[in-house]
Amino acid sequence: MSSHSPAKFTPVAIGLHWIMAAGLALAFGVGQYMSGLELSPWKLKIYTWHKWLGVTLFLLVWMRMAWRSTHRPPALPATMNRRLQKLTEIAHRALYVLMVLIPLTGWLHSSAAGVSVVYFNLLPLPNLVPKDKALSHLFETLHQALNWTLLVLVLGHVAAAFKHQFVDRDQLMARMRP
Amino acid sequence: MSQSGAETIGSGQITFTGTQMGASVQGNFRKFSADLHFDPQDLPHSYAHITIDLGSIDLASEESEDEIKGKHWLNIPSFPQAHFDSSDIRIVGPNQYLVWGLFQLKGVSKPLRIPLKMSYDRNGRSAQGRFTLKRNDFGVGDGTWSATDTVADEVTVDYHFTLVP
Ligand code: HEM
Ligand code: HEM
């Protein structure tokens, strides 16, 4: 079985993992910072950049999922019991779902607020729903709640990676090392 | 006072579209009223007086609404309404007209020309049109907001009214 399973993630998977990890951290930080600002031209600018970055991540996650569905990831180490392997699989799946839903709810929130998105001032994206205050609030709340869920999951994910590295010492991190 | 033959707006909408950072932002006013009379056979005696209750602005965001009601934008506590009073209506095509008049917003009066298209169906008559204003002409968005790189000067207004006697 393990002979069919690659030892490492592909360079593309590794590249996308780290580019997206950095992009998500930046989008999260910027989102957190900007929503506390007083309304000003600066706030509108930074909201726009946040949206462009978020849409970029939205595009990247689809490429990443397409790549993954055609390139098998390495099997988890046999030292992990079945339950833990299952849990890991669920957690990774949940991370992918969040990477899709977070930018999507951001886009829905912006649409419902009557603010369109013109990707890098070049490509006008359609408004997904008509302007509606209640809907806008709903998607704003969802966008926030999903972001906090992502934060919790990523902290668990990073903790798990560190446990593999420093407690189990099973070289799992090397599989994702650029 | 309404003269005989005066009409009012049965239902309708006034929406506007601004541009912030190159992307469109939609808003609308929920409350407005009109005293008007439109007779295609007698344009000289046709008129429109429209009053918009600016406090009824809907931007789908309390934060933006609070900001736009404040003194840098519409300054609604001092100027709660906007008015349009027509002075001249001319026909320019089949069921197409141009309405000249004075537009008052935030203490500034400027002449304005509004295109008007009348349509007739079983529910009666309706009027619609679209025109563009420059917000800086009216001091809407002053101070740090007057620069037009973040929020563009042009604001497009769309209206659609059904007319009832
Ligand atoms: C994966 C990409 C994204 C991440 C990680 C992200 C993260 C965040 C975070 C952490 C916040 C602050 C939430 C809070 O107030 O607690 C936020 C707010 C916001 N995000 Fe995103 N976001 C992403 C994508 C998008 C996209 C694509 C859009 C729109 C097209 C968007 C629009 C917004 C808006 C408008 C707010 C402000 C909400 C408010 O009014 O308070 N986001 N985002
Ligand atoms: C410092 C931060 C991070 C570290 C150290 C880290 C580490 C790792 C490692 C070692 C793997 C490989 C697991 C394996 O060999 O099976 C992995 C996979 C993964 N990571 Fe991260 N990661 C980090 C941040 C993130 C972030 C921010 C996300 C996105 C939300 C993320 C999403 C994923 C996903 C979805 C996988 C599964 C890949 C797959 O099987 O397709 N990671 N990560």
Image (cartoon, helix red, strand yellow):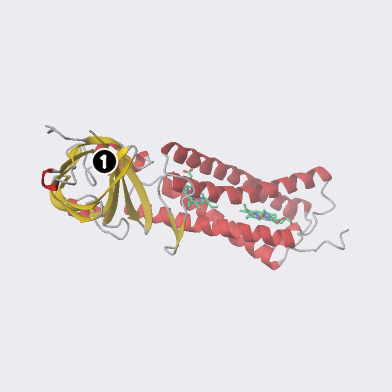
Ligand 1: does it lie within 8 Å of the C-beta at label 1?
A: no
Image mark 1: chain:
B
Residue in the foreground of this view, choosing between A177 and A92: A92
Q: Is residue A2 left or right of residue B99?
A: right
**In this figure, what is the number of numbered marks?**
1
How many other residues sit within 10 Å of disc 1, few (<14), some (14-19) or many (≥20)? some
Residue in the foreground of this view, choosing between A69 and A127: A127
Q: Does dot 1 land on a helix, a strand or a loop?
A: helix
Q: Position of residue B25 (x, y in %)?
A: 36, 50
Q: Position of residue A4 (x, y in %)?
A: 85, 62
> For the C terminus of chain A, which image quadrant?
bottom right
Residue in the foreground of this view, choosing between B125 and A105: B125
| Residue B32 shows up from this direction | no
Reply above or below: B70 against A67. above
| Residue B25 shows up from this direction | yes
Instruction: Return the residue at label 1.
Output: B69
Q: Quadrant of ligand 2?
A: bottom right
> For the N terminus of chain A, which image quadrant?
bottom right
Q: Position of residue B17 (x, y in %)?
A: 33, 51
Residue B33, quarter of picture = top left
Q: Position of residue A171 (x, y in %)?
A: 77, 59
Q: Is residue A8 left or right of residue A145?
A: right
Q: Is residue B75 left or right of residue A110?
A: left
Q: Is residue A142 left or right of residue A35?
A: right
Residue type at numbered disc 1: Lys
Reply above or below: B98 against A83. below
- The residue lying at 17 percent from left, 35 percent from top is B6
